[in-house]
Amino acid sequence: MIGKIPVRTRLRDAGLRPTRQRVALAEILFSHGHRHLSAEDLHAEALTAKVPVSLATVYNTLNQFTEAGLLREVAVEGTRTYFDTNTDDHHHFYVEDENRVFDIPGPHVEIGNLPPAPAGMEIVRVDVVVRLRTKR
């Protein structure tokens, strides 16, 4: 279930065919409420749940879910990407020494004075990632 909607229905509504692997990965992803996972995290959870799936399939599925609006991609570094099950507008903290992402609670980030978009373009979303580390 994604919220109160069955996974197969939610996938179909998003324009995705509910294959066995997509359904299994969606159930793992969305069964724990809002959270942030890397492809490697989801792959490990799938293997623990005895879902036979390759890491490449996990990456492809996460990208398909993101394109369909079921997930939100959070890029914290060039090679480090997380997928957020909460697709509402919000911002994130990233704990560098733990490789952990979590939501900034409430409306604590104000965005102002954005430059105008180039001709023929529009601003879709602004993502803020506040990087944290343990005090030394």
Image (spheres, helix red, strand yellow):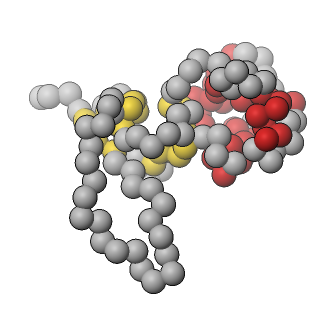
Where in the figure is residue 23, as x and y percent of width and height?
80, 29
Q: Furthest-left residue in view?
A: 136
Front residue of this view, candidates 30 and 53: 30
- In the displayed structure, would residue 2 be above or below residue 67? above
Front residue of this view, candidates 99 and 84: 84
Residue 46: tell me if it is visible. Answer: no
| Residue at the (25%, 58%) spot, across then down | 112
- In the displayed structure, would residue 119 be above or below residue 56? below
Task: Decide if residue 78 is on the left or right side of residue 49.
Answer: left
Task: Decide if residue 80 is on the left or right side of residue 47.
Answer: left
Q: Quadrant of the C terminus?
A: top left
Where in the figure is residue 72, as x and y percent of width and height?
55, 43
Where residue 96 sits, quadrant-wise, is top left
| Residue at the (85%, 36%) spot, across then down | 18
Where in the figure is residue 49, as x and y percent of width and height?
73, 16
| Residue at the (29%, 65%) spot, across then down | 114
Task: Decide if residue 132 is on the left or right side of residue 85.
Answer: left
Front residue of this view, candidates 105 and 21: 105
Where residue 58 sits, quadrant-wise, is top right
Q: Furthest-bottom residue in view?
A: 119
Where residue 30 sits, quadrant-wise, is top right
- In the displayed structure, would residue 53 be above or below residue 48? below
Q: Quadrant of the N terminus?
A: top right
Front residue of this view, candidates 74 and 80: 74
Q: How many marks?
A: 0
Task: Decide if residue 100 is on the left or right side of residue 43.
Answer: left
| Residue at the (56%, 21%) spot, across then down | 33
Where in the figure is residue 83, as x and y percent of width and height?
55, 39
Residue 57: tell me if it is visible. Answer: yes
